[in-house]
Image: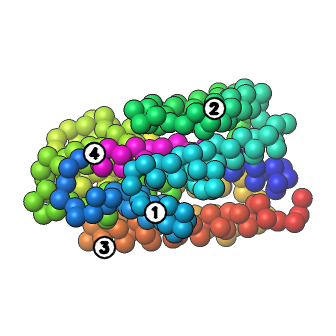
Amino acid sequence: MLSSTADHLYWMARSMERAENTARMLDVTYRLSLLKHASADPHHEWRAMLSISGLHEDFEARYPIPNAVNVMHFMTLDEKNPGSIYNSIFNARENARAVRGSITSEMWEALNITWLEMRKIYQEGIAEDGISRFFDWVKERSHLSRGITHGTLLRDDTFRFIRLGTFFERADNTARILDVKYHILLPSADDVGGAADYYQWGALLRSVSAFESYRKVYRDQITPKRVAELFVLRPDMARSLITCLNEVNRLLQEINGPRSAEVIRRCGQLHGSLRYGVIDDIFDHGLHEYLSEFLEQHYNLGDLINKTYFWSTDE
């Protein structure tokens, strides 16, 4: 496979997954912002959203206040923000267009229709009472894209690079969503274990479609340590870090190649730290510190994947 083709497939999948996860992150932030709490900063949740996404500087350069209206527009329909849902869907479609000969016609049609509908939403805007429907639409289109890919594509390197992009992006966003709640949105001492704390953790679980999974696994009270364990170390949780790295590690070994030794070794190190991780050790170290270190290693692994498979001059 040409490195340019692999590049388009990988970023097609990452862009669509990014659109879905941005919608999930905005959804949990929106839900948390509706909850009355003791923060002196009325825009606390929205500042947290921008900070954990790494987009606060771009936002501050163009918007005066990090309130719900401004952040929502910046992260959904702002064509000048490369991380907006609008641009993520556009990038997914453009990457698919570049490799139409490598994907199935059903995959192309699904992504193209998603982009056409996104462009219509962009022109008409999102009504205040329609933001939840918009988030649901983004998630449904992402689910449809993945389902068609899984149901129609030959299990070759095309499929592997698409799946690699999906799970790599998902791991990044799962870590960020968890960090938003735990590090930046910690409740006051009076709220810990109370109704507000319960609502916030419940909103976080629902944002990644994990509320029912939590109830099935743990059954009783929602606690920060158990939520973190579900998000980080549970291999039966669809969006957990270990589930994502299980897939990334497997896919890299299947792709392999003459220059793959270092990227496989580096992925194995990160995968091993999750596979043999213990939630008590993670909390003793500090969950925020752990997630920050994970994101740094994850970013470095992504950079190495780019250099190994996509930036080569050898075709």
Viewer-nearest residue: 188 or 164: 188
Q: Indicate the position of residue 35 as horizontal and vertical percent values.
A: 23, 47
Looking at the figure, which quarter contains the C terminus? bottom right
**Farthest residue in the front direction?**
64
Counting residues from the N terminus, which is met first, the one under dot 3 or under dot 4? 4
Q: In the image, is residue 245 part of the stretch drawn in magenta?
A: no
Can you identify the residue that label 4 sits on? 34
Left or right of residue 198: residue 117: right
Dot 2, crowdedness within 10 Å: few (<14), some or many (≥20)? few
Q: Is residue 4 above or below residue 264?
A: above
**Farthest residue in the right direction?**
315
Can you identify the residue that label 2 sits on? 120
Asked which quadrant contains residue 281, the reply is: bottom left
Counting residues from the N terminus, which is met first, the one under dot 1 or under dot 3? 1
Give the Cα separation between the discs numbered 3 and 4: 32 Å
| Label at residue 253 | none
Q: Residue at x 35, y 68 (%)?
A: 288
Give the amino acid at mark 3. His
Dot 1, crowdedness within 10 Å: few (<14), some or many (≥20)? few
Give the amino acid at mark 4. Leu
Asked which quadrant contains residue 192, the reply is: bottom left
Q: Indicate the position of residue 73 as horizontal and vertical percent values.
A: 51, 48
Give the amino acid at mark 1. Pro
Magenta stretch prevailing secondary structure: helix
